[in-house]
Amino acid sequence: MTKSEKNLQAKRISFSYMTYEKNSGLLGSLHDFVHRRKRAVHAIHDISFSINSGEIVGLLGPNGAGKTTLIKLMTGILPVNEGKIDAFSGINPFEKSSAYLKRIGVMFGQKSQLIWDLPPIDTLIMLREIYQIPKPVFEKRLSFFTKQLAVSEQLQIPVRKLSLGQRIKFELICAIIHYPEILFLDEPTIGIDVSSQSNIYRFLREINKERKMTIILTSHNTKDIVALAQRVIIIAKGEKIFDGTPNALISEHASQQIIEVTTDSPIEPLPIDLIELGDCHYQFLSNDSAQLPIALAHILSLKRRDGDLDEILVGLFSKLEGKK
Amino acid sequence: MIRLYRTLIKQSFEETFAYRGTTILTIVFGILFYAIVILTGSVYFSFAKDIFGWDFTDYLNLVTTANVMTYLYEFLFVQSQEALTSQILEGTLDYSLIRPVNTYWFHVLYRVDFPSLIPLILTVGIEWVIIARIRLSFSQILLYVLIVMLGTLFIFCLNQIAVTATFWIDGLSALAGLPEYIMDASTRPAKIYPKVIQVLFLWILPSLTVTNIPVSLRYRTSFRAVIWLAVVDACLLIASKFEWQRGLEQYVSAN
Amino acid sequence: MKYLVSFRNAFYSTIAYRGNFVLRLVTVSLQIGVAVFMWQAVFRFSGKGDIAGIDPLQMTYYLIIVNLLSLIFSTSLIFKFSQLVRSGNLTILLLRPVKLLVQAFFEYVGLSFPYLIIYGFVLVVSSETSSQSFTEILMTLALFAIIYITFFLLISAMSLVSFWLIQVWPMRPVINALFMLLGGQAFPLQVLPQTFRWLEYTPFALAGNQLALLSLGKVSSVQMLLVFLASISWSLVFLILIKELWRKGIHAYEGVGS
């Protein structure tokens, strides 16, 4: 497998879904079953990209931007309405062929696939049978994974007695036990402590390097992205607004330096470019406007600094909110 | 798939021991329930030796057969359906959508309920004695076994359809209990009901056929009813699979 | 009053799930139908005009009332409590400044309130067959209230087994079965031979069988007194049981997921 081989290609894909206005009661529900009032929501609009084998790509965007929908399109849970997703040169994910499903792994950070009352080993054995992994191979992988993630001791403890961090680690092992070629991670580090996070980052970087496993992740936590992603795709309101390396993102948008302002009284109404940090404490991107959006007489102090990824994103997203 | 099913059975077995208290309760109460039904019948027959041509042995045959089917259904499917209901309600089916296996059968065969095995064996034993007593021929016994299997499939389908309805109607917990009530109402001689009800539950939703035909084998053999039952089972199974597909689409779009 | 809120919420939740409410009435009608048809057949083939002093029409009323009572004496608290223990949400409730038992009682009343209304309605209709005096009606209501509390305490005590049992759903058919047999849902306990008549004073029988017979005017004043005494004694037993089970159970409670 060469580095440039394409794993996944999305060509001008769009996805809109219908929401149903629900009727209440039994009769209403029966009515819904036969005939439903529909309303279209455009979740993804005309997005194209291609992801090469071995890449780690971070999907970023504000809440409701369409990140999870995009993951669901790529994993084949949802069908595209327009355009085409092409996986491994020729597979349409939505056909849900077992050939495709065996080559991908998915972890939804907010949903669990571990069997609650049994130890994690039981879920893993079930997955071994589902993915038809030969026993010795399975054993070897499992001992490697659990050692790397420091959860060997917890393999035989019922899931309900594990800590959240340990559970997330096992969820991750479940997602990769069949060594997928593409690994999808949806909010993988939600709610876990810093040391578990860095442990997971290290592990993911290692298997990415050794197995050339493509990793596509969404996260609210920009630390995930900074630690892992070699490339970021930013989506907002269903559209792609950036595609490049994290450094490119920073240099492109951090040229907009951040100005922090302290004023003597609260500013009302709040101009669109201005973000409130605390009482009488605001910030804005330096090239957002040629002028200060605040009357000079109210300014107590001014400070200029470079933004980090978090702030760049906050700035970018709030600018988008303002536009729409 | 067979190896996967073996793993799932093994896990069910482990869970049986994880829930020891529940296991013992299921066994004790399962037997108790059967005893209560028999007792109720003995009260009826203490006032009339013969009801619509049926004597107490026939009644015993009726409730035992119905219980064999119910326990067989519980053994094979009830835990899976319980698990499925909670997974639909909690919205945790996403992983099922990306597994390279048939999701319908995966969820249907997800668990077996070992505790139900004990009352199942008990009722099968009692039925054995009843059959020996009423002297069924070998071919009648074969037919009896076939009807029990078709009946179990019938009970499974009714429940599966009710459980899958959870995709659309989440507040309707009472719906899941409806098949149980229907089967309970069918554990009576069909003739006690008015003609309309008889026709409805002998032919359209043949729950009375399921319970009454094995008993009537003692007097006559109705192949027509057995074939009809098989046809209805096939239709219900197809309907339940169709409902499952629609349900998954609903699940995906509702997220 | 904080407990009235529990009553109101429970009442609304019974009403809000209209589908559930209607279905429950449908299933109970189904059960009534089954029992009525069965008994009609028994009457017909026994050749008797009455069984244990109950004629076919009274039997029909009896079966309607006793099945309605099975709705009023709901067991859903057991499953709600199990959910609380299993999810660990009990911890949150423990931190609130309320008496859980009192709160549960108001919830219990709220859950059964719509059925109580229907029950009242049926009583008025069926009273034509019983011709009770005003004092008898008052006595009936008073006994109903006491038995209602007794049954609530029974259910509360049963729900505490959730501290030790992970799954309580196998209990559901059993409680139904107990109500069917001891509660007199399948047949009035009066039809049993004399040696089993003591069963009439078990809690399920008080809630189902006795209350149904009471509304048909089939209980003598001596029996009323016995029912009253039985109900009070059972309440005491359950109160003590609740106290003990709660004390031991809270130790066993792991606080899973909290």
Image: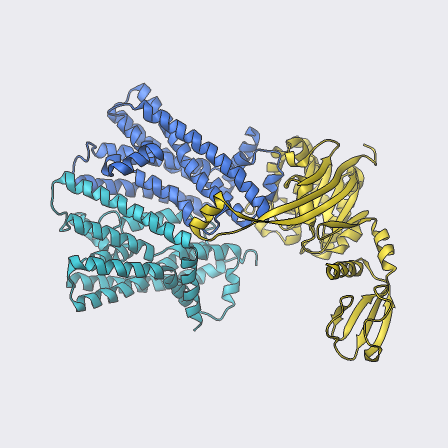
| Image location (x, y in percent) of residue A156 | 60, 44
For the rendered model, the colour scheme is by chain
What colour denotes chain A? yellow
Which residue is rendered at x = 29% and y = 56% of the image?
A: C69
Q: Is residue A37 above or below residue A50?
A: below
- Chain B shown in which color? blue
- Left or right, residue B53 beside residue C243: left
Chain drawn in cyan: C
Residue B17 in view, yes or no: no
Horizontal relation, residue B187 to residue B19: left or right: left
Residue B225 appears at what percent x and percent y? 33, 27
Tell me where residue B129 sits by quadrant.
top left
Kindly tell me whether residue A168 is visible in this rendering: yes
| In this picture, residue C145 sits left or right of residue A119 | left
* Foreground residue among B37 and A158: B37
Give whichever of B38, C35 is nearer the camera: C35
Q: Nearer the viewer, residue A102 or C222?
A: A102
The image position of residue B243, as x and y in percent, is: 49, 38
Q: Nearer the viewer, residue B167 or A324?
A: A324
Q: How many marks?
A: 0
Residue at 30 percent across and 36 percent down: it is B63
Where's residue A34, x and y in %?
A: 48, 43
Q: Residue at x 80, y 57 (%)?
A: A309
- The vertical placement of A205 against B137, above or below, is below
Name the quadrant of the N terminus of chain B. Answer: top right
